[in-house]
Amino acid sequence: MSFKRSAQLFVLLAILVSSLGFTGSAKAYYCSSYVTVQWGDTLSGIAALCGTTTYAIQAANPGLGSWVYAGQVLYIPTGYYAPAPVYYAPSGGTYVVQWGDTLGSIAARMGVSYYDILAVNPQIWNPSLIYGGQVINLPAAAPVYHTVQSGETLRIIAGYYGTSVYGLQLLNPLVYDANWIYAGQVIRVR
């Protein structure tokens, strides 16, 4: 192969690599005040990477819904990356959702009811759609216990306290089977 042909191939390869290379994306460890949405970006992904929330971005960009499109320019209210702190509140306060958390697991860990968490978080429209970095409020609650009486089932006890059998099972991990409770057993109901 001649020198001229090799040089042309090298220049073509360099142009190709530079055009496919660093296109600038919101997927960085910091964000400037304005971010241009790239193909594949999501509002929640941009919020997580920029150290803010989707609600803050939506509030800073009037008319912005849940969907973003490539080429759209968004104002980022924080303008820098700050990882969200983790709060573990024993009762009341706030909690920062971690990757893999569900409202049920948070409720069990914090010793509160799943439905009480929903009651103090009206911004959660779909309980199945929570995300890492989201800050949720926790209800202040002291544990409440119930002594099982003869003839009671978890379904009856759940009805007394306005919860579900599943909610009682989350609060009582030692109750392996909902059908195997006995009179005199003390179970946590809140």
Image: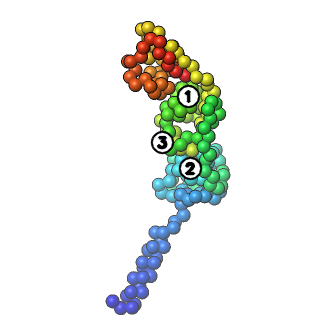
User: Label for residue 48?
Assistant: 2
* Residue type indicated by callout 1: Gly
Depth order, front residue of 163/57: 163
Residue in the picture at 45% in, 27% down: 173
Front residue of 55 and 141? 141
Mark in the foreground, 2 or 3: 3
Viewport quadrant of the C terminus: top right
Q: Callout 2: helix, strand or loop? A: helix
In the image, farthest residue toward the front = 184
- Give coordinates of residue 24: x percent, y percent: 54, 64
Closest to the camera, between mark 1 and mark 3, is 1
**Sequence order check: which comes first, mark 2 or mark 3?**
2
Task: Residue at 47% x, 9% y: name it.
Answer: 149
Give, as a three-letter code, the residue at label 2: Ala
CA gap between label 1 and label 2 equals: 27 Å
At a point 35% along the width and 91% down the height, the residue shown is 2
Mark 3: which amino acid?
Answer: Gly
Residue at the image point whose x is 58% and y is 58% from the top: 29
> Is residue 125 visible from the viewing direction of this image?
no
Give the quarter of the figure containing the N terminus: bottom left
Residue 184, horizontal then vertical, whole percent: 47, 12
**Label 1: element kind:** loop
Q: Position of residue 21 (x, y in %)?
A: 48, 69
> Between disc 1 and disc 2, whose residue precedes?
2
Which of 112 and 159 lies nearest the eye of the viewer?
112
Q: For the residues marked 1 and 3, what is the alpha-carbon distance in whole angstroms?
A: 18 Å
Q: Nearer the N terminus, badge 1 or badge 3?
A: 3
> What element does badge 3 sit on?
loop
Taking 152 as reference, is 73 left or right?
A: right
Q: Does any portion of residue 137 appear in the rendered image?
A: yes
The residue labelled by disc 1 is: 111
Quickly name the residue at label 3. 100
